[in-house]
């Protein structure tokens, strides 16, 4: 079900249903609630699953801003005013950084964390990827990033934009179902028609790039919620070694999915659910026993 909440401006979200404790699905940079469409229904077996569109993404307007701090405030308000707390938060890429900060700063709002190919700051070697470097450089270039991205999107059209995104984020884009591709193309068609649609991407990308250059060690240390990290070993955007290192340092459970890229919930939903569902079931049982 497609709904809106007033959280300092309209925020679009998808309510997948369910009547259990709240579970909030948070997308990453350039994503939307649609990123969870292949797993959202399955997660309602034990939870009420909700997936918001962050500021400027999906069908949520730009609002006051789309930097990390703006979307951090959105997530906090969504948890408190829409989902209910404490909630299980399942978050991908940039959304995982928001979720980790939320769990560290407001531990009463987060019961469990599932981080999917998380874009978390960590000092380590990144393999050189010319395509990824070119895309990143174009986005963060001052002044030019937004207009260039907007012109390219209009020139390419929605189908090519979506295809290029899945090519970058997936080990094998052909694994993504045609239904998922059509839904993303339809949304991108809407966004290209909006003159400001690329502004959110560029602003958020710059904010994320700045954040990735900082240390978040103390943030990770303050996370109290049980944490599972799921990471595809063919991820071109975030090295799997980063998740392994953070997991080892802070006792977070890490599961690596072989042959999968940056979006396992879309590229390999069955494998994603095979890992996350049993983990969540155990955690739900522990919470019930403690209660």
Image (cartoon, rainbow, N blue to C red):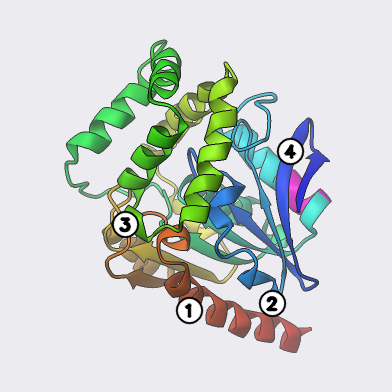
**N-terminal-most mark, 4 or 2:** 4
For the stretch drawn in magenta, the main secondary structure is helix
Residue found at x 43% / y 54%: 118
The relative height of residue 157 versus residue 173 in the rendered view (above or below) is above
Left or right of residue 131, residue 74 in this image:
right
Residue 127 position in % (x across, y down): 18, 47
Task: Tell whether label 1 touches label 3 (CB within 8 Å).
Answer: no
**N-terminal-most mark, 3 or 1:** 3
Residue at which label 1 appears: 274
Residue 105 position in % (x across, y down): 63, 51
Residue 6 position in % (x across, y down): 83, 37
Residue at which label 2 appears: 45
**N-terminal-most mark, 3 or 2:** 2
Residue found at x 24% / y 33%: 133
The relative height of residue 193 versus residue 205 in the rendered view (above or below) is above
Quarter of the rendering containing residue 247: bottom left
In front: 234, or 101? 234
**N-terminal-most mark, 4 or 3:** 4
Task: Tell whether label 2 touches label 1 (CB within 8 Å).
Answer: no
What SS does tag 1 mark? helix
Residue found at x 30% / y 57%: 172
Query: Nearer the observer, disc 3 or disc 1?
Result: 1
Work out how far the residue at label 3 is from the one at label 2, CA to CA, in angstroms. 32 Å
Residue 32 visible in the displayed image:
yes
Task: Count residues near mark 2 (Cα–Cα under 10 Å), then give few for <14, some for 14-19, many for 20+.
Answer: some
In front: 21, or 185? 185
Residue at which label 4 appears: 11
Residue at which label 3 appears: 242
Work out how far the residue at label 1 is from the one at label 2, CA to CA, in angstroms. 14 Å
Disc sitting over residue 125 in the figure: none
């Amino acid at each position: 079900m497609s709904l809106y909440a007033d959280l300092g401006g309209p925020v679009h979200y998808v309510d997948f249903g369910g009547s259990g404790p709240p579970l909030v699905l948070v997308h990453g940079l350039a994503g939307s609630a649609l990123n969870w469409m292949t797993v959202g229904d399955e997660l309602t077996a034990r939870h009420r699953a909700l997936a918001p569109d962050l500021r400027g993404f999906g069908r949520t307007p730009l609002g006051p801003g789309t930097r990390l701090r703006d979307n951090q405030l959105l997530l906090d308000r969504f948890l408190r005013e829409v989902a209910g707390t404490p909630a299980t938060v399942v978050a991908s890429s940039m959304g995982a950084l928001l979720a980790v900060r939320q769990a560290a700063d407001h531990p009463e709002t987060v019961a469990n964390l599932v981080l999917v190919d998380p874009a978390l700051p960590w000092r380590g070697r990144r393999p050189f990827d010319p395509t990824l470097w070119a895309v990143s450089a174009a986005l963060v270039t001052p002044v030019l990033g937004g207009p260039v991205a907007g012109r390219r999107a209009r020139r390419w059209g929605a189908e090519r934009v979506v295809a290029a995104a899945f090519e970058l984020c997936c080990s094998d884009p052909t694994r993504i179902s045609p239904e998922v591709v059509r839904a993303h193309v339809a949304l991108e068609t809407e966004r290209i028609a909006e003159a400001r649609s690329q502004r959110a991407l560029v602003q958020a990308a710059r904010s994320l790039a700045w954040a990735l250059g900082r240390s978040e060690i103390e943030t990770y240390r303050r996370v109290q919620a049980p944490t599972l990290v799921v990471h595809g070993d063919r991820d071109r955007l975030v090295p799997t070694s980063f998740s392994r290192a953070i997991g080892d340092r802070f006792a977070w459970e890490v599961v690596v999915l072989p042959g999968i890229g940056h979006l396992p919930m879309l590229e390999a939903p069955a494998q994603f659910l095979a890992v996350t569902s049993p983990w969540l079931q155990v955690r739900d049982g522990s919470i019930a026993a403690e209660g």
